[in-house]
Image: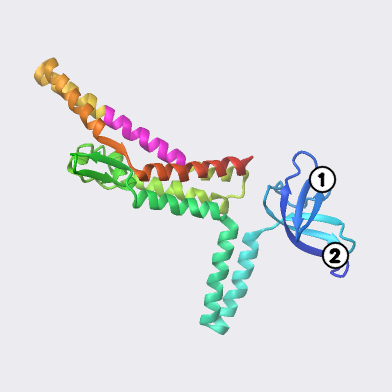
Amino acid sequence: MTNNSTYQMISGKILRDGQNGNGLVSSNGEQYEFSIEKHWKSDTPPKLGASVNIEIDSSGQLLSVQALDIQSEMSQRFKQMSGKVQTEGLPAVKELAQHIQKDFVALVGIPRIVIFVGLLLSWYVLNTLVIQVSARYSVDFNLFELLGVVSNGGLDSLGRGKAPSSGFYGFLAWVSALLLFMPLVWKHRLAAWGAAAPLIFMVLTMLSLWFKIRSGSSQANSMAAGLGGDMAAQMADQMMKAVMQAISLGLGFYVAMAFAIAGAFIAFKESR
């Protein structure tokens, strides 16, 4: 059993994970080298930048390093605050909300939260696709409106300026965004790859849309050729080329791709 007069438990951060030689932790301006075999006491390997509990003796010598279980601390703190809410009322409720917000940010990290919010804004608010109908008139579609085209194959809805419901593809968009937080529910190194889901979704969605447009173009050419011969097919082909030239990617696409690439970078970095 640890004697508090002899040993001290402090919190710190991992500066070097110790996968190649000794690791390094820092706390209150002090740095301590540690060995995975001798000092590391957690079941999962040390991760660069992770929060840890550091045990040192009275002379300042490192005794052990253990990963900080933020979820367990959150659960324990929530139980304590819940009891406080019952006795103190509204002031304790405000304090509890502040603790939940602080702990959530500490658990998932600010980058993931920023990427999640950025994706939703770029998907819902900004335009992903622009159709220039005339010199003065254009039709804009956000991602979820565009997903209706992919989901229902309604390429003709682009011409009407109204996209069908996003349906199952809209559900997949939300799933891909929420997978940013997969490490919350799956404690495994591979869970970090959930942050790459938005990029995969964006790429597959745009490829699917491109194939649908190409398929629609081929069908139009075949129908025109069947009705009016080669001349009609050439006219249909020219019309489709004009349509393709009128379609351009909007600001929302580039913003969403930037956030999605940032998520993929986090996935690559944290899974190493």
Q: Going by the image, does 167 lie left or right of 268?
A: left
- Judging depth in this view, the residue of 142 and 168 nearest the camera is 142
Badge 2 or badge 1: first in the primary sequence: 2
- Judging depth in this view, the residue of 188 and 103 nearest the camera is 103
Q: Position of residue 257 (x, y in %)?
A: 43, 41
Q: Going by the image, does 62 lie left or right of 91?
A: right
What residue appears at the point 80 percent right and 40 percent down from the top-left corner? 21
Q: Position of residue 219 (x, y in %)?
A: 21, 25
Q: Position of residue 256 (x, y in %)?
A: 42, 45
Which circle marks residue 7 in the picture? 2
Look at the picture and state if 253 lies above or below 219: below
Question: Which amino acid type is shown beneath numbered disc 1?
Answer: Glu
Quarter residue 247 falls in = top left
- Specify the principal SS of the magenta part: helix
- The residue most toward the front is 135
Residue at the spot of label 1: 37
Quadrant position of the N terminus in the picture: bottom right
SS at badge 1: loop
Quarter residue 91 falls in = bottom right
Q: Going by the image, does 61 lie left or right of 134?
A: right
What residue appears at the point 85 percent right and 64 percent down from the top-left corner? 7
- Judging depth in this view, the residue of 202 and 30 nearest the camera is 30
SS at badge 2: strand
- The residue most toward the top is 230
Q: Which residues are magenta?
A: 198-214
- The residue most toward the left is 228
Which circle marks residue 232 in the picture? none
Whether tag 2 and tag 1 are in contact, CB under 8 A, the answer is no
Quadrant position of the C terminus in the picture: top right
Q: Is residue 1 visible?
A: no
Q: Going by the image, does 196 lie left or right of 127?
A: right
